[in-house]
Image (spheres, grey):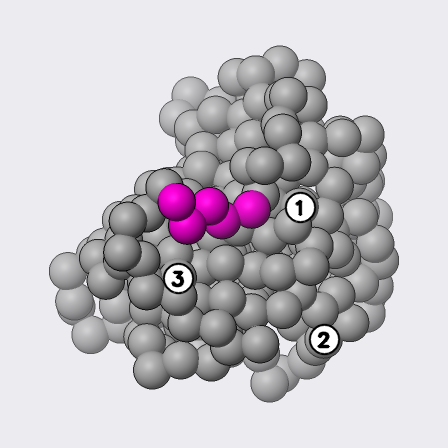
């Protein structure tokens, strides 16, 4: 793989309890979208062509010790609201991760999660629990999704000058907030190039990945929030 190959991250959701529900809900949905793309995929309903394509994606992802990816997500509302575009960067090393997204930063060192919001100069601190009922990077290279999705190969498209295979993922758990995830797999490189996520409330999240670096040199300090770099930051400890 090369640094120019696109990639998308698997489903990461954490939900610190706070009064900032709208912001946290958007973060949860965005990272649900990003991380669903890098799961070690197994198949609730076997579509042989989809299985072969997704297995190739998983094989590449599992070979990485660390990664960095840039992404862009556009949120379109069901009621004709003005689309919003969010851009960000994801860095991961094992179970550790650091995510920078349009005025927000999220750090995790596998023990603690820090969510920093630039606008309010506030950081929320929660405990990292890999066993809780949420989607976390600790489940990135596992078969967590063995029975949670059915997969179907839709066909081939050309997007941004690249040929992609389109695969639809439908959650078997009907209580999930989204009804379908569309993945676009770069045919030449076997990596996720983009797609869409459809929420039951009518919101549609369209995403693309502009860059990907496999196995970058990442220090452990990157995954720990350093309050000294944020003068007068308000710390909200929710542990």
Q: Which badge, 1 or 3, comes first in the chain's sequence?
A: 1
Tag 3's secondary structure? Answer: strand
Residue toward you, 131 or 222: 222
Tell me where residue 63 sits by quadrant. top right
Measured in 3D between alpha carbons, the distance from the residue under mark 2 to the one under mark 1, in whole angstroms, is: 17 Å
Answer few, some or many: residues within 10 Å of disc 1's Cα (few below 14, many 20 plus, some between 14 and 19).
Answer: many
Instruction: Indicate the quadrant containing the C terminus: top left, top right, bottom left or bottom right.
Output: bottom right
Of the two numbered discs 1 and 3 in the rendering, the one whose residue sits closer to the viewer:
3
- Going 59% across and 36% down the picture, which residue do you hit? 221
Q: Callout 2: helix, strand or loop?
A: loop
Disc nearest the viewer among 2 and 1: 1
Sequence order check: which comes first, mark 2 or mark 1?
A: 1
Q: Is label 2 in contact with label 3 (beta carbons under 8 Å)?
A: no
Q: Which residue is mark 1?
A: 96
- Secondary structure mostly seen in the magenta stretch: loop
Q: Which dot marks residue 123?
A: 3
Asked if 232 appears above or below 3 in the picture, the reply is: below
Residue 169 seen in render: no
Q: Is residue 12 left or right of residue 101?
A: right
Q: Say the numbered circle drawn on residue 132.
A: 2
The answer to whether residue 114 is left or right of residue 51 is left
Residue located 65% across and 36% down the image:
220
Question: Which region of the structure is painted magenta?
Answer: 224-228
Q: Nearer the viewer, residue 134 or 114?
A: 114
Where 138 sits versus 52, above or below?
below
Of the two numbered discs 2 and 3 in the rendering, the one whose residue sits closer to the viewer: 3
State the CA–CA distance, disc 1 to disc 3: 18 Å
């Amino acid at each position: 793989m090369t640094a120019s190959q696109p990639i998308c991250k698997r489903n990461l959701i954490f939900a610190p309890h706070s009064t900032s529900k709208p912001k946290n809900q958007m973060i949860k949905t965005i990272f649900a979208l990003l991380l669903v793309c890098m799961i070690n995929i197994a198949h609730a309903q076997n579509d042989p062509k989809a299985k072969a394509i997704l297995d190739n994606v998983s094989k590449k992802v599992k070979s990485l010790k660390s990664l960095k990816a840039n992404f862009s997500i556009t949120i379109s509302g069901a009621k004709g609201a003005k689309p919003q575009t969010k851009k960000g960067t994801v860095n991961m090393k094992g179970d550790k991760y650091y995510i920078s997204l349009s005025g927000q930063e999220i750090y995790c060192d596998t023990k603690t999660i820090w969510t920093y919001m630039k606008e309010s100069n506030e950081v929320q601190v929660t405990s990292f629990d890999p066993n809780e009922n949420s989607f976390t990077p600790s489940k990135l290279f596992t078969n967590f999704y063995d029975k949670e999705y059915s997969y179907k190969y839709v066909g081939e498209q050309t997007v941004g000058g690249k040929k992609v295979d389109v695969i639809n993922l439908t959650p078997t758990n009907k209580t999930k907030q989204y009804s379908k995830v569309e993945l676009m797999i770069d045919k030449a490189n076997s990596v996720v190039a983009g797609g869409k996520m459809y929420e039951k409330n009518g919101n549609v999240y369209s995403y693309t990945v502009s860059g990907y670096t496999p196995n970058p040199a990442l220090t452990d300090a990157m995954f720990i929030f350093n309050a000294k770099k944020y003068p007068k930051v308000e710390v909200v400890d929710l542990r």
